[in-house]
Amino acid sequence: MQKHKEPVYPPGVVTSMEDLMRYEYYVQEIPLLPQHPVYSLLAGRHASRLRGRGLDFEEVRIYVPGDDIRNIDWHVTARTGVTHSKVFNEEKERPTFLLVDQSSMLFFGSSERVKSVVAAQLAALSAFYTIKRGDRVGGIVFNESGNDFITPKRSKEHVQYLLQSIVTKNRLLPERTQLLPNTQLLGNILQMARSVISHDYVLTVISDLSVMNDESRQHLRSIAMHNDVILIHITDPLEAVLPAGRLVLSDGEYQLLWENKHNTRYSESYEAMKRSMVAEFRNYRIPVVFIDTATTVESQIMQFFVNRST
């Protein structure tokens, strides 16, 4: 009986455990200080307003389920009639919760790799940074057909379990025979995350955000009230600049011949979209990081902070 051979795909089309595990060594080789902003972005360990028993009192705010009851300020509670907690400033573990999009909308790329592979690599980089600093990492890996919920834990074996979930869903994408857009997908996953994240988490959304809607925005705003939220928006060069001349567009079944005469307007519209998104989420202290498919993930992350510091 002949064994079924697993398809072989060109580099950048699908990922593998070997590809993702190399980010463990990449993390070990980079001499980053704990307070380095790369770590703050990807893993979230930093001095912040944390709900724990520290040395420096910072503020009193309304009690949130999950707060340590020993920190309840009974004087303010009695005066206002509403339960309040004391907040202290200390350095404390902040679990990282990754939302990793592996839907069919991300199986697209005009350059070195497709978006779904970039999403997988970003998740691996973030996960290894997190456990390197002693924090827990987990998340939800999702596509249109379902999702895998990974409880945050702190070990290399657990990161491997997370990455294997990503690889499994990633390698389903070339087998899809049709695009399965679901405008509610991201909103549903954020709602799920919102139900399990209490406070002091770092929520990192890794997607091309193509199905972002009002429901998704509402969930993000709510989560950001008591957690750090980071949006990593995966892009492709073809989304920014279309080739000049005649283009043949297809959905796999039908074709359309389109003559591109408005490249400048198209590019301006794309840049305006990016500025608008950054401005919108800045109001909620949610950074938006754009990562493209043309350059390596690690070089783009480092360049992002070089640009911010100049």
Image (cartoon, rainbow, N blue to C red):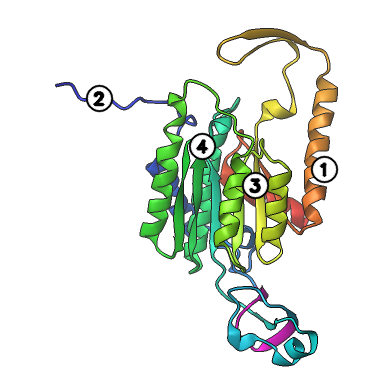
- The residue wearing badge 4 is 117
In front: label 4 or label 1: 1
Q: Amino acid at mark 1?
A: Ser
- The residue wearing badge 1 is 276
- The residue wearing badge 3 is 232
User: In this figure, what is the number of numbered marks?
Assistant: 4
Q: Are marks 4 and 1 in contact (CB under 8 Å)?
A: no
Q: Secondary structure at mark 4?
A: helix
Mark toward the start of the polypeptide (3 vs 4) = 4
Q: Are marks 2 and 4 in contact (CB under 8 Å)?
A: no
- The residue wearing badge 2 is 4
Q: Position of residue 15 (x, y in %)?
A: 44, 37
Distance between the alpha carbons at the discs numbered 2 and 4: 24 Å
Among all residues in the image, which is located at the extreme left?
A: 1
Q: Are marks 2 and 1 in contact (CB under 8 Å)?
A: no
Distance between the alpha carbons at the discs numbered 4 and 1: 26 Å
Among all residues in the image, which is located at the extreme bottom?
A: 75
The residue drawn where x is 43% and y is 65% is 154
Mark toward the start of the polypeptide (3 vs 1) = 3
Binning the other alpha carbons within 10 Å of mark 3 as few (below 14), some (14 to 19) or many (20 upward) gives some
Distance between the alpha carbons at the discs numbered 2 and 1: 49 Å
Q: Is residue 305 visible?
A: no
Q: Amino acid at mark 3?
A: Ile
